[in-house]
Image (cartoon, rainbow, N blue to C red):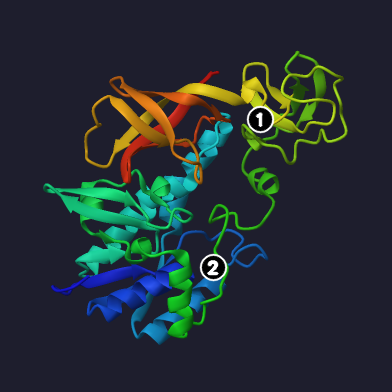
Amino acid sequence: MSAPHHRIVVGLSGGVDSAVSAWLLKQAGHEVVGIFMKNWEDDDDSEFCSSRQDFLDAAAVADVVGIDLEHVNFAADYKDRVFAEFLREHQAGRTPNPDVLCNAEIKFKAFLDHAVRLGAELIATGHYARVRQREGRFELLKGLDPLKDQSYFLHRLRQPQLARTRFPVGELPKTEVRRIALEIGLPNARKKDSTGICFIGERPFREFLGRYLANTPGPMEDDRGRVVGEHVGLSFYTLGQRKGIGLGGIKPGRGAAGGGDHAPWFVARKDLERNVLVVVQGHDHPWLQSTALQADDLSWVAGAPPREGRFAAKTRYRQADAACALALAEHALQLRFDAPQWAVTPGQSAVLYDCEVCLGGGVIARSLPA
């Protein structure tokens, strides 16, 4: 972030990471402008929506850093490009990751386009990731703080987007970001990190989804085909789910694979044709383990897939890298893992890594049992 200096538009979310990003860029001598993105309008005044407070926090940060702040409404784009797909995937029985789509369609497309119209040469966000230019191409790298790395959510970014993007806190541990925020007196220095899906906030997920998707109750079966309860609709469950199943006091008897009488229940499969939710007892039940997966809707950071061979992959955020072998088809990939992976979930992203370099990935279509 040394000379030459640039006009950089920073996405200020109201959080501490984007706030410190803006300050670092300003200290480096860049011309910095802040933009607060409003991506959701429904229930804007409810107890679960924090967008008003987030904007006030962003405005306070802009005042301390000494930059202008613009409030931009991307809610229509978000509903068309992200939320509609989110509902389609849930309706089909899959579990999508809207944060991945939001980054690709809103933060690094709609936001980037708006920033360019403002005369920006670059954009910046508070993501924990890094960009490196090498041999004429741009690479997406993991953030240096392994506990905060967000490259998983950014794997659908392409060369034109990375060429214009900076991640100022990607080189720092979160503890250092907090220290800087306190040292320079940022008003949100102690603000908690946001969690969950941006447009849902802290509200009950099933209640929220029920406003948009029809409930079609059906039977819950265990691994022996015995009915052990009733589900409220397949769209409202995800593989590996433990909480909210409603089977805490039900015991199928001894001998259940993966656990005993008192082992917790987990969602293992969805039978869409029969409208049956399959649940099993025990975290280590074989039906929760997969040795391979197939993914489609592929996206590669370099613009083309890597060669087939040995890599590492994540099938969910905050998962440790899992060693695997990559095989490619025309519009799909297959990953075969050295060790079984837990609750590989259709609709989630399988993201491929070569050491610290995020290569891209795809949307999980199906898993293969261990």
- Where residue 140 appears, as percent x and y from the top left, is 29, 49
Q: Residue at x 41, y 31 (%)?
A: 323
Q: Which residue is drawn at 37% across and 83% down?
A: 65
How many residues crowd around disc 1 within 10 Å: few (fewer than 14), some, or many (20 or more)? many
Vertical order, 369 against 123 (above or below)? above
Q: Which residue lies furthest to the top in this view?
A: 224
Per the image, label 2 sits on a secondary structure element best described as: helix
Return the disc, 1 or 2, that comes first in the chain's sequence.
2
Residue 189 visible in the picture: yes
Please name the residue that numbered disc 1 is placed on: 234
Q: Quadrant of residue 247?
A: top right
The tally of labels here is: 2
Amino acid, disc 2 = Ser
Q: In which quarter of the image is residue 289?
A: top right
Amino acid, disc 1 = Leu
Vertical order, 14 against 308 (above or below)? below
Q: Residue at x 54, y 23 (%)?
A: 290
Residue 59 visible in the picture: no
